Image (cartoon, rainbow, N blue to C red):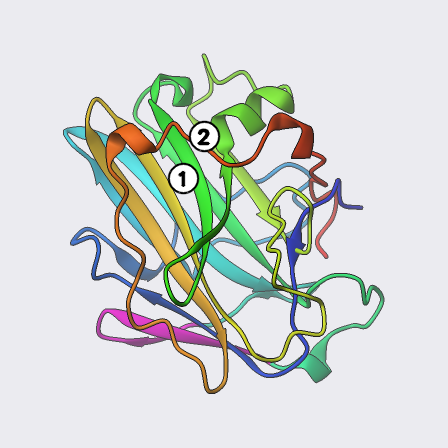
Amino acid sequence: MFRQTILGLAAAVSLAAAGAASANLVYDANLATAWNPPGNNGQVNGHFVVENQLGGTAIELGLRAQQRRIGPITADAAGQSYAYTVSAGSDPGTNDTRAWWNFDWSATYGDAIGKLDSLVLRVYDVGGTQLNSVDLLAFATATSIDISTTSTIQESWNPMFSVVGVPTFSVNSTNFAYWFTLTASDHGDVARSLMCVHTAGNNCETPPPLPEPASLAIVGLGLAALAVTRRRKLD
């Protein structure tokens, strides 16, 4: 079961992660933190894009794509970018209202996660226009995670879930390109992991600009939209 989220796909899809915005990004990597999101049912570590530094404090921000009911999509590393491939025909077909792949995110801080100034998931189109954002500290609080004591929060979401709400995306999309970013800030320092999701013929060559720390507290999604379906089993 899921608790509820968003993403979609109906053709061969390529997902790439580019690291021009951060010198600390590591590609196709395991999380140093165990991958164990709520409701985890056999999901394995690996194939994350990882940022691991925020000023002088250790942080780990991870993003990856995962094929539903199958597992992490194997990355093809190439310099500072790499591509995933998902075939629509390999979808189990048991739920046609969601994308055939999910994206996973993980954030671990060297202190209580609530001591960060901000932790935000953003979605952009290929032109760099922000389509949506989720205040993950507010999300954690709304879902009864004690951010004053825990140092790690993790979720596995689908782009069709209302918490993400990519407005131009549908389950039958065959022509799109989106950037996903996971950004943390603390006392003026900013760290970000990012990946691009795109179909054949599209690209995400230019990542969105790194936001200024002061803008990170401004999030375009209210708590009323946090009708998130948390994964209860591997889907």
User: In the drawing, what numbered circle is on residue 152?
Assistant: 2
Q: Is residue 109 above or below residue 133?
A: above
At x 25% / y 54%, what residue is drawn? Answer: 25
Whole-percent x, y for residue 218 in the image:
41, 30
Q: Secondary structure at mark 2?
A: strand
Nearest the camera: 57 or 15? 15
The answer to whether residue 167 is magenta is: no
Q: CA distance from mark 1 to mark 2?
A: 8 Å
Q: Quadrant of residue 194?
A: bottom left
Which residues are the magenta region?
75-86
Looking at this view, name the residue that lies furthest to the bottom: 201
Nearest the camera: 132 or 61? 132
Whole-percent x, y for residue 202 in the image:
44, 81
**Where is mark 1, residue-wise?**
33
What is the crowding at mark 2: few (fewer than 14 residues within 10 Å), some, or many (at least 20)?
A: many
Q: Is residue 85 above or below residue 65?
A: below
Q: Quadrant of residue 115?
A: top left
